[in-house]
Image (cartoon, rainbow, N blue to C red):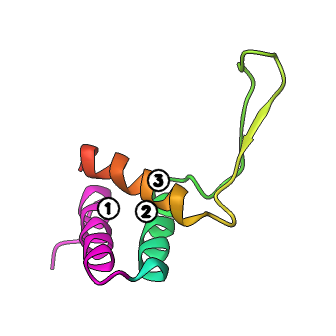
Amino acid sequence: MKIPDLNDLIADLQTAKQIAIDDRNPNALIMATIGQAKLLGLDKTIKDVTPHNDKPVVFNITGLSPEAALAISKRLDEEY
């Protein structure tokens, strides 16, 4: 049995997201998006120390909105 690699897992979650979109199930869409974000390490707080105003920018996917989930989904569609 082949162990799936990261691309396989991301692609599987992308398929799940498309099914969620087709079924108009926003909760399933959000969960699949969060799954992808976790696989990509985006569930961790990340500080970017090079913003325009020299103040750190903090990113965190906790409480991901449906709009943000859709934006991430579209971006991943382009990449995978």
| Left or right of 61 in this view: 13 | left
Q: Which residues are magenta?
A: 1-24
- Residue 56: percent from the left, percent from the top? 80, 29
Which amino acid type is shown beneath numbered disc 3? Answer: Leu
Residue at 42% across, 74% down? 29
Figure check: 32 above or below 8? below
The answer to whether mark 1 and mark 3 are in CB contact below 8 A is yes
Figure check: 35 above or below 59? below
Q: Quadrant of residue 4?
A: bottom left
Name the residue carrying label 2. 36
Q: Neighbour class for label 1 at 10 Å: few (<14), some, many (≥20)?
A: many
- Residue 6: percent from the left, percent from the top? 32, 58
The answer to whether mark 2 and mark 3 are in CB contact below 8 A is yes
Which amino acid type is shown beneath numbered disc 2? Answer: Gln
Q: Quadrant of residue 7?
A: bottom left
- Residue 38: percent from the left, percent from the top? 52, 62
Question: Residue 40's mark?
Answer: 3
The answer to whether mark 1 and mark 2 are in CB contact below 8 A is yes
| Left or right of 6 in this view: 32 | right
Which amino acid type is shown beneath numbered disc 1? Answer: Ile
Residue at 47% across, 53% down? 40
Name the residue carrying label 1. 10
| Mark 1 → mark 3, Cα distance in angstroms | 9 Å
| Mark 1 → mark 2, Cα distance in angstroms | 6 Å
Helix, strand or loop for the magenta stretch, by majority: helix
